[in-house]
């Protein structure tokens, strides 16, 4: 192992990932497993699964300098008390304190979409530019914002949370309580539910109606699945056009499971966005797939420890 290395953790609603990342942003080893994510309980099942996965890593814990974590939000930042919408048993769960107790190391926790943005700015599709929006389009829709070469946290650590930007005036209602959120339209589960309501895969059980199933059927030319992908792309384009005009962005890097749809998603997204950016500076933005793939969450989480000068401004806040 390199002299400076970090235990990196990426926690999503459906998966857990852990790894060892060195100071150059290289993932030296990794392990992945499904998130058990029970619908009810005390949250300990998720933590036990996470610690068991970490135990599979071969690295010597004594050589680690810290623990970086990306987790779904919302959360109390930087205290690291997490309440992910997609993990119902974690409500104000003291994840930072529990990991600090387990490892005896500094623990920095941020939103998983923010970690993607950090990773793409540091080592991915946003390398070399100073103004980047990183997005995750998967079980949820989230984002992180780099302006002037530094992560922008906002008052509560939630700056860049584009998934809850309003892109429709009247519907649908989001789990957050608002109406017309981008996530309520473009996340994988919500998009699949909408398509099912339009007649897609009638009679199929829920576990055969995922966002990935929808993408596969769209690739086969299913007309409802194609319409659903255009619906998601249009909504994403509206949200990105607004963010670009507001923040003067250079690059928007999109990762997450639904982003793997490629042109099925990116073509309607690009068309919708271009219809809605009128000012010259906004037209220069590039929307691209995230460059680091599945490793982006781990690389970004590690950067919270390895590059605090750019990506961690929380000292003294919690």
Image: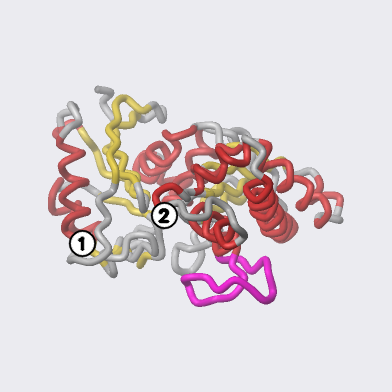
Q: Is residue 273 magenta?
A: no
Q: Nearer the observer, disc 1 or disc 2?
A: 2
> Image quadrant for the C terminus?
bottom left
In the figure, residue 88 lies in which quadrant?
Answer: bottom left
Residue 142 lies left or right of residue 6; in this view the side is right
Q: Total marks drawn?
A: 2
Residue 171 in magenta?
Answer: yes
Q: Residue at x 32, y 60 (%)?
A: 87
Q: Residue at x 75, y 45 (%)?
A: 270
| Residue at (61, 66) in percent of width and height | 165
> Would you identify the image quadrant in which residue 262 lies?
top right
Residue 13 coordinates in the image, percent (x, y) = 36, 53
Along the line of sight, which residue is nearer the eye, 97 or 316? Answer: 97
Looking at the image, residue 46 sits to the left or right of residue 74; the answer is left
| Residue at numbered disc 1 | 43
Residue 301, by quadrant, is top left
Q: Is residue 267 visible?
A: yes
Q: Residues within 10 Å of mark 1 (few under 14, many from 20)?
A: some
| Part of the protein shown in magenta | 164-181
Q: Estimate the x, y position of residue 215 in percent, counting from the top left.
A: 57, 41
Q: Label 2: which residue?
A: 206
- Classify 10 Å Cα crowding around label 2: few (below 14), some (14-19), many (20 and above): few
Q: CA distance from mark 1 to mark 2?
A: 24 Å
Give the main secondary structure, helix, strand or loop, of the magenta stretch. loop
Relative height, residue 202 to residue 88 (above, below): above
Residue 220: x and y, percent? Answer: 62, 35
């Amino acid at each position: 192992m390199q002299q400076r290395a970090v235990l990196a953790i990426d926690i999503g609603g459906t998966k857990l990932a852990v790894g060892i990342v060195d100071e150059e942003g290289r993932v030296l080893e990794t392990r992945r497993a499904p998130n058990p994510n029970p619908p009810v309980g005390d949250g300990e099942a998720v933590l036990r699964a996470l610690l068991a996965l970490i135990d599979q890593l071969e690295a010597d814990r004594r050589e680690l300098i810290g623990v970086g974590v990306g987790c779904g939000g919302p959360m109390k930042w930087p205290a690291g008390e997490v309440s992910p919408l997609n993990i119902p048993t974690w409500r104000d769960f003291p994840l930072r304190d529990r990991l600090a107790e387990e490892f005896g190391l500094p623990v920095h926790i941020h939103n998983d979409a923010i970690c993607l943005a950090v990773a793409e700015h540091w080592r991915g599709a946003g390398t070399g530019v100073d103004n980047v929006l990183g997005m995750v389009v998967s079980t949820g829709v989230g984002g992180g914002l780099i302006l002037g070469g530094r992560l922008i946290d906002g008052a509560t650590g939630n700056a860049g949370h584009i998934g809850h930007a309003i892109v429709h005036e009247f519907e649908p209602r989001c789990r957050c309580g608002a109406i017309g959120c981008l996530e309520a339209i473009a996340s994988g589960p919500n998009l699949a539910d909408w398509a099912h309501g339009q007649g897609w895969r009638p009679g199929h059980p829920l576990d055969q109606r995922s966002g990935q199933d929808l993408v596969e059927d769209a690739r086969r030319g299913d007309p409802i699945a194609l319409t659903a992908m255009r619906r998601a792309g249009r909504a994403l384009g509206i949200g990105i056009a607004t963010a670009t005009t507001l923040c003067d962005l250079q690059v928007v890097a999109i990762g997450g499971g639904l982003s793997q749809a490629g042109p099925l998603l990116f073509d309607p997204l690009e068309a919708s966005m271009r219809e809605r950016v009128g000012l010259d500076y906004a037209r220069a933005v590039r929307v691209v797939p995230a460059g680091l793939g599945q490793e982006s969450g781990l690389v970004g989480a590690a950067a919270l420890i390895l590059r605090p000068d750019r990506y961690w401004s929380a000292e003294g806040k919690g």
